[in-house]
Amino acid sequence: MSPLFSSRIRPAHIIAVGFLLLILTGALLLTLPAATRSGESASFSDALFTATSSTCVTGLVVHDTFEYWSFFGQLVLLLLIQAGGMGVVTMAVAVALIMRRRIGLKQRFVLQEAISAPRMGGIVRMTGFILRLTFALEGLGALLLALRFCPQMGFVQGMWYAVFHSVSAFCNAGFDLMGVTAPYASLTGYVGDPLVSLTIAGLIVAGGLGFFAWSDIRDHTWHLRSYRLQTKLVLSVTAALLLLPALFFYFFEFSQPQWASLTQSERILASVFQSVTPRTAGFNTVNLGLLSMPSVLLMILLMLTGGSPGSTAGGFKTTSLAMLFLSIRAVLSQRDSIQVFHRRIPPEVLRNTVALVMLYVILFLSGGILLCCFDDVSLSQALFECASAIGTVGLTLGITPELSDASRLVLISLMYFGRVGGLTMLYAMTGSHVPVPAQMPQEKIAIG
């Protein structure tokens, strides 16, 4: 079908190489003189960082998107965001479907891993559902945003802004064109606008739920008991991660003196929006440089968690967070297995969860240390940027444009790892091992 689906390499390799090729292609396009407003070629370092950020749907930038990139450059970013959000393999299979080419067993297996499908059966139909859902929600979001942007900017520019921000929000990218008002402004000019704030927030949540959760919602509507266990966990954890941070921001953060200028309705909207965007969109409606340290720490934890499996979001995922808390509950209740919603979860799921979360934490902390070594930044700033990169979020405390090339390379690596996925990267870097039937003698050790 395509060299991308060669039988000589495993699915993890295909996914990792596919994202890498897309990044390099985008970087080369962004170095063209037509991609910048000045007509001068962007440096390869700037182009590579921006292409990685857009393909990995992160949103960290070294130049303001509106001020630096031309319409052609912005269009390249939009295409990279769309392809990166839906996944390289998904896009390749979508093209094959459009061209009416046969999808073989090998391609179905790769697609299953790429979109975190629980089984291979119906995988091609699922791809069609992903495409329809994506374009339907992005189209609806664009229409709602156009109601605000078209009267403000004119029909043509307003529609372009509506489409760009709708795709960026649903794909959890965080790229914006609001530098038309002030550089790196993001959505701070719409902190009190419910149409823009809630539309963007809704698209972020929709993209972060995961396509298989949406499939369950489509098939079973309000019959919650019929949902798969994964969907129940995704919805439960997502609801908790939206409600609890919103309450924290409202009652603690936005009651601080630096936010005295916010009205009551702006405080409510800002609290809701700031609880949504760290997982993992990168838009902001307030100046993040004014946040207190507890709020910065909370946002770091939310960025590391991210969205749900099979979604456009990054992070180690809501189901991993659920597994960690459920394992604590199992220990406290002295159960031999993890149980939730009248189901027992296999022990290998917890093993994979611990490996994945520890990998994220190690890379996150290592990246923060390296940024502090390479550049004169505080540890809190470095950790915030690294959490934003590995969680593919895009929120920033404003230090990214000033970082050295070495620090940018650290962030590029974290963004790539965060988008491709921790387990996928591990499988891609390690060889295939044949399991040995014999088992070693068992011996307990003391912990705690």
Image (tube, rainbow, N blue to C red):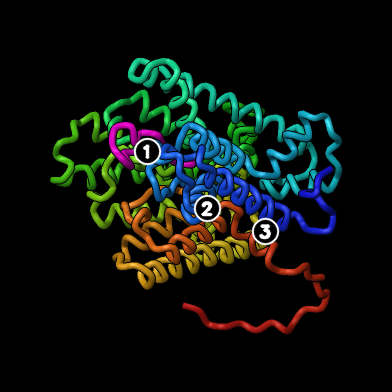
Residue 342 seen in the figure: no
Q: Is residue 423 left or right of residue 297?
A: right
Number of the front mark, 3 or 2: 2
Q: Position of residue 134 (x, y in %)?
A: 59, 30
Q: Secondary structure at mark 3?
A: loop
Q: Position of residue 356 (x, y in %)?
A: 57, 62
Q: Position of residue 382 (x, y in %)?
A: 36, 62
Q: Secondary structure at mark 2?
A: helix
Query: Cβ–Cβ below 8 Å for labels 1 and 2?
Result: no
- Look at mark 2 in the image and give the residue it sits on: 48
Q: Position of residue 278 (x, y in %)?
A: 41, 46
Q: Is residue 180 left or right of residue 267?
A: right
- Look at mark 3 in the image and give the residue it sits on: 346
- Cα distance, mark 1 to mark 2? 18 Å
Q: What is the three-letter code of the residue carrying label 1? A: Glu
Q: Earlier in the sequence, mark 1 or mark 3?
A: 1
- Type of secondary structure dominating the magenta stretch: loop
* Residue at the image point whose x is 31% and y is 52% from the top: 398
Which residue is more in the foreground, 437 or 105? Answer: 105
Q: Earlier in the sequence, mark 3 or mark 2?
A: 2
| Residue 176: in magenta span | yes
Which residue is more in the foreground, 129 or 409? Answer: 409
* Residue at the image point whose x is 13% and y is 45% from the top: 257
Range of residues picked out in magenta: 173-185
- Look at mark 1 in the image and give the residue it sits on: 67
- Cα distance, mark 3 to mark 2? 41 Å
Q: What is the three-letter code of the residue carrying label 3? A: Pro
Q: What is the three-letter code of the residue carrying label 2? A: Leu
* Residue at the image point whose x is 59% and y is 59% from the top: 422
Which residue is more in the foreground, 399 or 445? Answer: 399
Q: Earlier in the sequence, mark 1 or mark 2?
A: 2
